Image: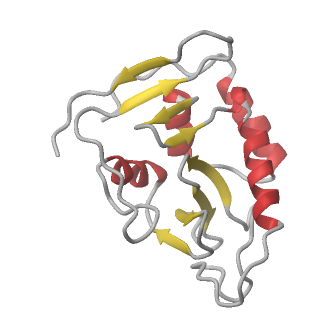
Amino acid sequence: MLGESTAPAEGSARQWRALEARLGTGLPDDYKAVVDAYAPVQMNGHLYLVSPGEGLAEYIERVVEEFRGASWRDDVACPGFERTGPRFGGAAGMIPLADTDRGDYVFSVREPDTGAWRILTCDGDEQDFHEYRMSFAEWLHGYLVGGDMIGPGSSVFYPGPVRMERWSRVRGERPLVWHGPDRGR
C-alpha cells in the first residue's frame, strides 16, 4: 500500500536501541520497520511519523510530559487503565507513536502479562481513548483505507495512492512528495 521503501538510515539499529534505553521501554517492531522505511513523513496530508534520527525521542518525551500534565476527568475512558487513569511513558504506560495535524494521537502500550502491543488513540479535543487490539501496521492500514481508527466518526479517506511527503530542513527547498501504488476503494 505504501510502495517502495527507503533503506533504513545508517546506524538505525543503534539509534533504536539508544531511544528505547532512553525511554525505559521497547517499541513495537512493526512500528520501527515502518518508521525505518518511510519516516520522517506525513501521510495523506494528516498523519506524521518521525524517525529516531529526526527527533523521535524529543517528540515522545514532549507528548508524554504534555499528557502527564493534563487534568483528567474521573470518568475518562482509557481501556486498560480503568483503575489508575491514563498513564504515559515507561514500560507500563502509553508511548506516543504518531499524531496528526487534526490533533489526534496514536499511542502503543504493552500488555504486562502477554507482552503483546495494542494501540490507543485519542482526539486532542476529547479526553477519551479508543482501543485497537492490533499491531501498529494493522492500525496504519485501517487508517489509510479510511477506517474509524481514532474513534467513532474519525475516518479520513483519500482515494487513489497514499500520498507521502518528506519535508526538507533546508530553507526554501521543496518537500519530497511521492505516492504509493494505486489502490482502489
- x, y (%) of residue 2? 35, 32
Quarter assignment of residue 184: top left
Tell me how many marks there are.
Answer: 0
Quarter assignment of residue 106: bottom right
- x, y (%) of residue 181? 25, 27
- x, y (%) of residue 12? 66, 25
**Is residue 179 shown left or right of residue 39?**
left
Q: Residue at x 52, y 17 (%)?
A: 175
Q: Quadrant of the N terminus?
A: top left
Q: Residue at x 64, y 83 (%)?
A: 76
Report the colour scheme.
secondary structure
**Is residue 35 shown left or right of residue 135?**
right
Q: Quick one: 133 or 51, which is closer to the camera?
A: 51
Quarter assignment of residue 29: top right
**Is residue 73 shown left or right of residue 18?**
left
Does 35 appear above or below 108? above
- x, y (%) of residue 130? 50, 72
Can residue 89 be seen in this snapshot?
Answer: no
Q: Residue at x 70, y 32 (%)?
A: 52
Does 84 appear above or below 116? below
Q: Residue furthest left?
A: 184
Can residue 163 be seen in this snapshot?
Answer: yes
Q: Quick one: 153 or 121, which is closer to the camera?
A: 153
Q: Residue at x 65, y 71 (%)?
A: 112
Does 123 appear above or below 99? below
